[in-house]
Image: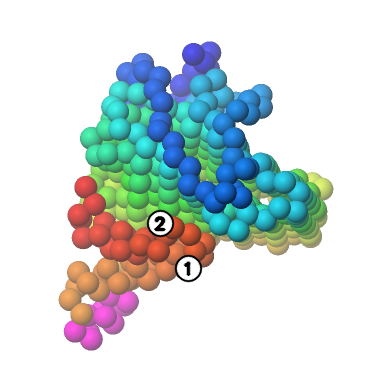
């Protein structure tokens, strides 16, 4: 067990969360079932034998993940390009357990790889999953990572995405969150090498009593680095969402560019969304912007569709799908992505549970 204490909502990084509802003592240590689908070329890059590198944990959940990790390691050699995506599926079918999957992606110089990581549990599975992904992109490496939350309505997730990019690297980190009771992701990118790039993109949709919770960091620690973030979410019924994000431009990161956008739709009177973007800039000669919105479907857009004979419920569905279109269009062409529009549409109709 960890010697660290459970966090509370008094801590800024846990503000607005539901962490006060969690009792870790109600869970026993379990195992998640992990399946890896990959080409013969990609399978040579996958291992489960690498030890977790020691690091200072930010909280009890990261600490417990290090201590109890079910590790999958992917190492892509210098100049190696993995043409087909690696699909990792974690399935949880037992209640009363806590599991700690950890994925380490080590992309060496001028390599390229795409990984899709799916998290699945059945409705009624009351358990906790604490996943960590650790991305390391060497000089000129190109990493695309897609996390898909397909958890059941009683499962909690407290997840971490940690990515570090060296000179001229490109890291694209995508998150699709549709499932879970309370689903949280802390996504941090650190650009350590000159010219490093990152993109963080998320789509999340909560209904019933769900809550999606995102905390992000774009940390520029070298000159001429570039980061962009686009998170779009919707909440309906009495669901909730939280987004808090920080752009940090360090003193030596001159001529860097960082952009952060969070948009939220509230589709019911009982739904609630919070959005808090922040900037921390320690140098001049940079370009930074942040923007956030929370509000209902635009009446003009709805009226335009209804005036052309489209029924009100269909009009709202079309507006929401259009709202998510900007994110859907950015997602890579990998399995399980093509049917997302249909799954969002199904959730809009209230048939997701």
For the question of whether residue 30 can be seen, the reply is yes
SS type, badge 2: loop
Identify the residue under disc 1: 329
Against 236, is 159 above or below?
above
Against 5, is 233 above or below?
below
Task: Identify the residue at image location x=42%, y=68%.
Answer: 325
Q: Is residue 165 magenta?
A: no
Q: Which x, y percent locates residue 259?
A: 61, 59
Against 6, is 300 above or below?
below
Q: Which x, y percent locates residue 252?
A: 82, 48
SS type, badge 1: loop
For the question of whether residue 299 can be seen, the reply is no
Relative side of 12 to 240, left or right:
right
Q: Which residues are magenta?
A: 300-309
Task: Identify the residue at image location x=32%, y=76%.
Answer: 301
Task: Identify the residue at image location x=26%, y=80%.
Answer: 305
Please name the predominant secondary structure of the magenta segment in the image.
helix
Q: Nearer the viewer, residue 305 or 154?
A: 154
Q: CA distance from mark 2 to mark 1?
A: 14 Å
């Amino acid at each position: 067990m960890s010697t660290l204490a459970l966090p509370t909502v008094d801590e800024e990084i846990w503000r607005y969360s539901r962490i006060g509802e969690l009792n870790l003592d109600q869970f026993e240590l379990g195992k998640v079932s992990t399946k890896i689908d990959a080409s013969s070329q990609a399978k040579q890059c996958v291992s489960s034998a690498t030890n977790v590198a020691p690091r200072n944990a930010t909280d009890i959940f990261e600490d417990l993940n290090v201590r109890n990790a079910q590790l999958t390691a992917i190492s892509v050699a210098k100049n190696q390009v993995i043409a087909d995506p690696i699909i990792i599926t974690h399935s949880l079918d037992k209640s009363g357990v806590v599991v700690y999957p950890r994925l380490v992606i080590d992309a060496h110089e001028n390599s390229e790889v795409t990984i899709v990581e799916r998290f699945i549990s059945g409705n009624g599975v009351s358990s906790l999953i604490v996943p960590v992904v650790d991305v390391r992109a060497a000089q000129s490496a190109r990493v695309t990572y897609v996390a898909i939350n397909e958890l059941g309505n009683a499962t909690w997730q407290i997840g971490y995405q940690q990515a570090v990019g060296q000179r001229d690297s490109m890291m694209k980190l995508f998150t699709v969150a549709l499932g879970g009771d309370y689903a949280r992701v802390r996504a941090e990118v650190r650009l350590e090498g000159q010219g490093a790039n990152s993109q963080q993109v998320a789509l999340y949709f909560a209904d019933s009593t769900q809550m999606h919770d995102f905390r992000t960091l774009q940390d520029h620690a070298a000159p001429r680095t570039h980061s962009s973030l686009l998170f779009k979410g919707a909440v309906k019924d009495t669901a909730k969402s939280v987004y808090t994000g920080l752009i940090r431009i360090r003193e030596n990161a001159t001529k860097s560019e960082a952009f952060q956008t969070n948009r939220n739709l509230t589709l019911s009177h009982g739904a609630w969304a919070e959005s808090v973007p922040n900037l921390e800039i320690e140098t001049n000669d940079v370009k930074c912007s942040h923007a956030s919105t929370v509000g209902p479907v635009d009446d003009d857009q709805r009226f335009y569709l209804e005036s052309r004979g489209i029924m009100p419920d269909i009009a709202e569905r079309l507006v929401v799908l259009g709202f998510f279109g900007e994110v859907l269009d950015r997602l890579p062409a990998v399995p399980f992505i093509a049917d997302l529009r249909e799954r969002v549409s199904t959730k809009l109709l209230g048939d997701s549970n």
